Amino acid sequence: MSLVHYEIRDGIGVIRLNNPPVNALSTALRRDIQEAFAAAREDASEALLLICDGRTFVAGADISEFDKPPQPPSLPEVIEQIEQSHKPVIASLHGTALGGGLELALACHYRCGLASARVGLPEVKLGLLPGAGGTQRLPRLVGVEKALKIISGGKPIPAVEAEKMGLLDRVFDTGAADLLPRALEYAREIIDRRAGPRRVGELPAPSAGAETFSQFRQQLDKRSRGQLAPQLIVDAVQAATEQPLQRGLETERQLFVQCRESDQSHALRHVFFAEREAARVDGLEGVEPRPVHSVGIIGAGTMGGGIAMCFASAGIPVTLLEMNGEALERGRAAIERNYATAVRRGKLDEVQKERCLAAIRGTTDYGDLAQVDLVIEAVFEDLNVKREVFARLDRTCRPGAILASNTSYQDLDAIAAATARPYDVVGLHFFSPANIMKLLEVVRGKRTADDVLATAMKLAKRIGKMPVLSGVCYGFIGNRMLRRYGSQAQLCLIEGASPEQVDGAMESWGMAMGPIAVGDLAGLDIGYRARQSLDDEQKGDPRSYCIADALVEQGRLGQKSGAGFYRYDAETRSRKPDPLVASLIEEKATEFDVVRRTFTDAEIRERLLLALVNEGAKILEEGIAQRPGDIDVVYIYGYGFPAHRGGPMFYADSRGLRGVYAAICDLQAQYGGDCWEPAPLLRELAESEMTFAGWAEGNRQF
Ligand code: 3HC
Ligand code: NAI
């Protein structure tokens, strides 16, 4: 069956694309578009209207086809055919016209659409550049500077803004049902005006001085350090100013293929699909989520306040409970400050801010939580305190209410056991700052009900989070792996590296922030306090925390006290190495009989990254994470792992598990300890020349 329907309406040939869910330009769709345009060429229609069924206009090339051999017709061929049409062609947009979808629209001679539509060239987020004329046609239409911004930023822009810059010709402020009639009227107007085809490719070449491009390259160097596609985008747009259209298109194609074949694009494409898969819990298909119209939050501290903002910003009313009026007031003031910052940064206007604040009601009375649909506990990280809170919620909340904990490390099953309804209990582990960080670990307890999980996954999306399912273990997926990574960073310090070398080695590789600086940012006292509740065996190798403990005992808690592993400038918060810390590290090395030596950056990276991979393999094997891609999503969205490296498990697969396993065995021989005990799954996969991804795929088929 054809994916394109063609009919003539009042003299206008209507070409309707229908390839759910997002009208991606698969081989079959490209072929059917080509056939429809060929048929329309000779018939009686006076103009052609390209429109889509379903929730959106074309969302781009079909990303899943990039790993397969290309099949004809190519998108550039289809686009060329459309642009060359001798009848005027009008694109009619709704939803999002993205990537190849916008390039298709740019090949049309006129563009109209709903005011609610958005257009963009997000290829850069996949490590690509627009490969079907976007880098050549967009600058001809909107100028070089705007085109550079749109293509290298990848962020879609609203139709109204697109109209202002000449990217759209007509915007209809109407609902989706009226799009076709309004677009037909517009097409009729073009016929009546005898406007004829207006080909973007035939517009004069855009011009810009060499300094425009060099400045832009420099900016991108800072913003997207080490990434290939942003730099090649500038090359492609520059070609539009220097070469005639056909040559420019060829240059663009070569650069596109270079990107498509790059490791970075493979990694980013993996992340695109992993993100979407992570939101699915295997075995929950068809489970109906519970409705959530109101939320209670216990604790208005760092996390509780941020979590309240997530719900208020999504229009879900929040009741925020604290121990007393003073704590409530402190929490409320922090929330107000955060919203004020959002207004200053242009993320929110005053009216929206007031609406959000009005959605958060403070209380000290548990009775006010009796009717809410979901309660999230964010009190001190202490099992007894949490169990008391849950016992109280059990007595207070209505049957069917979901009871969630934001605990980072406590045993969710022990918390659930404080209630008579453990099936209603789930972990919702937000990351700090909760109003900004996208990751949400949804923790499934031993007895968590399926519909509770389904509700949590759906709700996460509603509040703009990226949910990933985790089983119960110490630290869940992310913090359990972080512990290994952090310990190795600390061991590198005592064995001879400096804090700035460890951070530099990881940051130059692409981590958003090095591990030592992250510790300072989070507050060294948090780990210190957490260690107080552990016995010596649980704490692990004392060489991996003795320096941090000593700093805390000197009152150096990290950024918040102006000093931790680094000293911080009071105004700029920039970090500076501190000779006192260097001496402290040497003292500790002497105390623990460690002979210090020099490190290479590569050695540091090897230890830190392989510690993540080995622990990730254990997490996968134990079924704590559903899939390797889930672990990658956790690390990218929660811990600043560079997306263009695909996440720790993708990194290991790309490197080859045989080599990864051998390197871990070497580290085990050199250093010993639990961290380097190779995961049995890793050994098995290495010996059978498999990958984590291949193993997960195989598991799914059985
Ligand atoms: N190719 C293949 N599959 C795609 C796709 C694409 N371009 N875009 C979306 N999908 C799939 C998703 O994987 C998902 O599949 P699933 O249900 O099996 O998980 C399904 O469509 C729905 O997608 P979302 O869950 O993301 O739906 P939303 O409604 O939340 O978002 C969207 C819709 C805004 C269109 C979003 O899907 C999106 O941003 N898509 C990618 C757009 C993009 O990057 N386009 C550029 C592609 S590269 C290109 O065009 C190259 C060209 O220049 C040559
Ligand atoms: P916090 O100390 O900033 O806030 C805790 C708040 O809970 C305080 O305002 C306190 O007054 C209140 N509180 C304590 N007992 C209470 C009770 N019985 N009833 C009502 N309110 C009570 O702590 P933070 O950092 O917000 O942490 C809260 C939880 O979130 C902890 O479980 C922590 O592990 C977890 N978490 C913390 C992260 C972080 O980076 N701070 C990240 C992810 C999770």
Image (cartoon, rainbow, N blue to C red):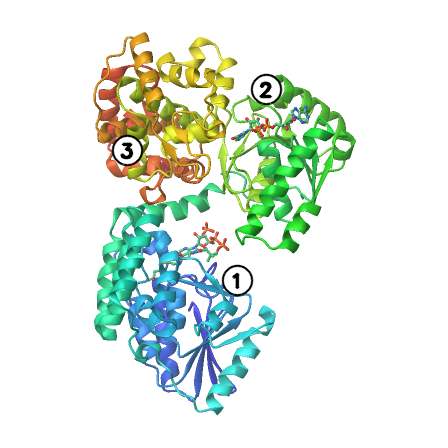
Disc 1, ligand 1: is the CB inside 8 Å? Answer: yes
Residue labelled with disc 1: 55
The span from disc 3 to disc 2 (Cα, nearest Å) is 35 Å
Q: Secondary structure under badge 3?
A: helix
Q: Secondary structure at mark 2?
A: loop
Dots 1 and 3: beta carbons under 8 Å? no
In primary-sequence order, the first of circles 3 and 2 is: 2
User: Pointers 3 and 2 in contact (CB under 8 A)?
Assistant: no
The crowd level at tag 2 (other Cα within 10 Å; few <14, some 14-19, many 20+) is few
User: Which comes sooner in the sequence, label 1 or label 2?
Assistant: 1
Residue nearest the viewer, comparing 187 with 568: 568
Q: Quadrant of the N terminus?
A: bottom left
Residue extending farthest right: 367
Horizontal and vertical percent position of residue 591: 32, 8
Please give left or right for residue 507 compared with residue 384 in the image.
left
Q: Residue 434: which quarter of the image?
A: top right
Note whether residue 71 is visible: no
Q: Residue at x 64, y 20 (%)?
A: 385
Q: Amino acid at mark 1?
A: Arg
Tell me which corner region of the image, top left, top right, bottom left or bottom right, holds residue 390: top right
**Between marks 3 and 2 in the image, the one whose residue lies nearer the viewer:** 3
Q: Circle 2 sits on which residue?
A: 382
- Packing grade of label 3 (10 A; few <14, some 14-19, many >=20) is some
Of the residues shown, which amino acid type is indicated by label 3? Ala
What SS does tag 1 mark? Answer: loop
- Crowding around mark 1 (Cα neighbors within 10 Å: few <14, some 14 to 19, many 20+) is some
Circle 3 residue: 505
